[in-house]
Amino acid sequence: MWTIGLTHYLILAAMLFCIGVAVIVTKRNAIGILFGVELILNAGNLNLVAFSRYRGADIAGQVVAMFGIVLAAAEAAIAVAIVVNLYNATATIDVDSATTLRG
Amino acid sequence: MAESHTRSAYGTARQAGGGRRSSRRPAALIFFGAVVAVVLFVWALAAAFEYVDGLVVADSHRVAETGEIVRTRFGGPLTTAEIVDYLPERLRFRPVSWLFWPLQFSLVRDAIAVTGLVGFVSVFTMYAIWWERKVAAHIQSRLGPMRVGGWHGWAQSLADKIKLLTKEDLVPAGADRILYRLAPYMAFTPVLLAFVALPFGTYWVLRNLDVALLFVLAMLGIEVIAVIVAGWASNNKWSLYGGMREASQMVAYESPMGLALLVPIMLAGTLNLAAIGDQQQAGFHMWVVFRNPFAAVAFVLYFVAALASCKRAPFDLPEAESELVAGFMTEYSGFRWGVFFFAEYTSMFVVSGLATTLFLGAWYSPLPAGWGEALAGGGVVARAAHGLLFSGPLWFIAKCVALVYVQIWLRWTLPRVRIDQVLYLFVQVLLPLGMVVLLGNTLWVFLVPEDGIVAVVANTLLCTAGVIVAAAFLGVAVVARARRYRLVGSLAVDHLPGA
Amino acid sequence: MRHALRWIVMAGVWSALAGTAWGAEAPVPPAESSSTILEAIAFYAMAAVALLSGLAILVSRNLVRNVVCLLAALGAVAGLYFLLAANLLGAIQLIVYAGGTLVLITFGVMLTSRPGSDRQLVRGWERIAGGVVCVTLFIGLCMVLLCTEWATVAASAEPTTVAAVGRALLTDYLVPFELASVLLLVMLIGAAYLVRRDGESGAEDDADRC
C-alpha cells in the first residue's frame, strides 16, 4: 500500500485508458472524442515512463514517450483542423451527422 | 485603470493624522522599520539554515568516519541534546536547540521557504502596482498617489487591497459559475509555481531542477488557459474577445520566445537555471547578452515576446481598455480582480527573472569578480561588503526590478498595436528573425574560436554598447532630476500636498 | 534631528541588506534521502486528480469545463512523471501538452461550439453498452497486469538528466527523431491546408474576427 511499485502505475494507466475509451464511445461531439484520445495517449505514455523507471532507469521508455507527446500534438492539430472544417461544412460537429460519404 | 481607487483612499488619509507634518514622519519610520525587520528576519533565517546544514553535514561526516547509524532526516533526527553539544559555549541553552531542531527536516524548511516566497511575491506585487502608478504619473507630469501612509502614498496599494477585499464579488448572470470562480486562481497558481524553479541565488532556489527553464516556461504558458477560461466563463462578449485574443497572441509569441531562449541554452549547454547563472559570474563582460551579437538580438527578441506573455502594452490586447472595456477582466470585481492583478505583476517578475538569469548575469554583480577576492577572505565587515557587492539575491532582485521598470516605462510610452499587427509582428517578423538568430548563433559557436580575435572584439564592442546604454539611461535620469522645475513645473515639485 | 534619524534608518537598512547578501553564501544542502511515505502520498494525490478529472470529462457535457479537467489530468500526469524521476518529460508534458495542445483544442472548442444545440452523448443503451465494454476491458487489463511477473530492477532515485535524453535522441533514436520533425512539418502544412477557405485571403478575415 505505502510502497509504490510498477503495478500501481500500471493499474492507474489502465484506469485512465479505460476512462479514455469510455469517453470515446459515449461522446458524439468530435472535440469530446479528442479528449478521450488525449487521455488514452497519456495512459500509454505513463506506462512507458513507469517501465522506463522500474526497469533500471532505461532511457528508451522516456524517449518513446516523448515521441508520443509529439504525435499527440500533431494529432490534435490535425484533428482540430478537420473538426473546424467539418463545422464550416455542416454547422455541427456531431460525428453521427457526418454521413455524406456513406455509400 | 487603478486610478479610480484614489478617491476612496482620501478618507483613510484624513483620519490617519491631524497635522500633515506630524503624520508623515512616523509612517516613513514604520515603512523603513518594516523593511529592516523583514531583511533581518530573512538574514536570521538564512543564518539558521546555514548553521543546521553545517550540523547535518558534520553529522554525516561523523557517520562516515565512525560507522554510526545515520540519524539525520527521516532516518532519525538529531536530538536536542546533540544540537546542544554542537552549539558554541556561550549558546548552550536548551531553548536555543529547540529553535534549531525543526529546521533539520526538509518539510519544515520547505514550508518556511514557501511562506517566504509567498510573502515576497505579495509585497513585490503590492509595491509594483504602487510603483507603476507613480511611474505613470511622473511620465504624465502628475504625482500619482500621495496621501495614504504619508510618504509618497506608500500605503496606497495596501488600502486598495483592503478595499478590494471588502468589495462585493459579483458573478454575472449566465456565467459558468465554477469556471468563473476558478479562473483567477488558475492564473495565479502557475505563476507562483514558477518560483519553485526560479533561482534567486546559487543556493537560493526551492528546487534546483535540471529542467528549470522548461518548467518556468510551462508555468507561464498555463496561465494563458486561465485567461481564455476567464473570458469564456464571464458570458460577456468583450471578455470572450479578450480570451480569444490572448489565445491567438500566445500561439504567435511562443515560437519566437522559444527560439530566442535557445540561444542562451546553446551557449550554456544546460537547462538548469542555477548552472546557467553560475556561468556568468566573472563580471559583466561574461553576461550572455554581451557574448556575441546574436545573443544580444536574442535578448531583445525575448524581451519583446515576454511583454506579450505578460499582456503588457504595447501587446495588452486581451485587456485593451479602450476597445474591450477590460477584456477578460471585464466582469471581475473585488478579490478575484485583485488576484488577476497579482498574477500579472508576478509574471512580470518571473519573465524579468528569466531574462536576468539567462542574459544579464543572474545574481552576480557587474563588477569583475577579481576585485572582490581581497574582501572575500577578510573579517565580518569585509565579507558583508563582498556579499553585498558581488553576489546574492539582492542583485537578482535589483536587476529584475530594473527590467520590471522597463516594462512599466514601455507601457506608459508606447501606443497599443492592433491584434493583426501583433500577429504579423510575431509570426512574420520576429519568428524569421529568431530563426536567423538561432542559425547565426550556431555558426558563431562552431566557427568563432572562444578566445579568438573576433570573439574578443565582438565582446568588447557589445560591452561598450551596454555601458553606453546604461550611462545614457542614468544620465537622462540625472538631467531630468536636475531640470525638474523646467520639465514638470514648480507646482508639481513644490506646492502639491506631499510633494 | 530629522536628518540624523533618516541617516540612522538608512544605515540600518544597508547593514541589514549587507547581512542578507552575506547569508547568500550558504553551503550546498546535503542530498535528499527519498521518503517512501511522502512518495506514496504524492502518488495517490496525483492519481486521484488524474482519475477524477478523467471521470469529470466522461460525465460533463460542457466542453470548456472539459478543457479545464483535461488540464488537471495532464498536470497530474506531469506530476507523476516528476515522481518517476523523468523531469524532462514532465516539463515537456506541461509545456507542449498543457501549454500548447490544450490552447489549440480550446481554439477548436470556441470556433465550433454553439451552446445548447448539439447533443453531447450517445443514446442511453449505447452508453450502457460502452460502460460495460470499458469495465470489462479494465478487468481484463488488471488480470493481465496482476498475473504477470514483472521483472523489475531496483530503481535509482536520481532523475534522468536532460543530457542523457538528448544524447539518446541524437544517437540511438536519430531516425525517429528526424521522422518526427518531418511529421511536424507535414502536420503544419496539412493543418494550414485543411482550414484554408477557397477564394478568400485568410489574413484580413482573421483580423476582422478578432
Image (cartoon, grey):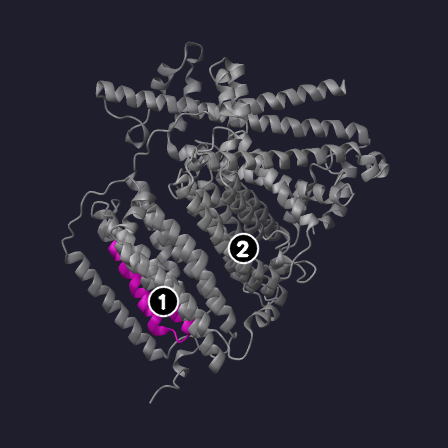
User: B245 or C61: which is nearer to us?
Assistant: B245
Q: Amino acid at mark 1?
A: Gly
From the top left corner, tell me how far across and down residue B497 is, in percent: 82, 36
What's the chain of the residue with tag 1? A
Q: Say above or below: B49 vs B246.
A: above
Q: Say above or below: B317 vs B260.
A: below
Magenta extent? A9-37
Q: Secondary structure at mark 2?
A: helix
Residue furthest to the front: B453
User: A11 or B162: which is nearer to us?
Assistant: A11
Q: Residue tagged by mark 2?
A: B430
Q: Is residue B216 visible?
A: no
Do badges 2 and 1 share one subunit?
Answer: no
Q: Residue tagged by mark 1?
A: A36
Badge 1: residue crowd in 10 Å (few <14, some 14–19, many ≥20): many
**Residue at 77%, 30% in the rendered image:** B23
What's the chain of the residue with tag 2? B
From the top left corner, tell me how far across and down residue B403 is, in percent: 59, 40
Quadrant of the rendered structure where residue A45 is?
A: bottom left
Left or right of B415 on screen, residue B101: left
Quadrant of the rendered structure where residue B92 is?
A: top left
Magenta span main SS: helix
Q: Which mark is residue C105?
A: none
Residue furthest to the top: B89
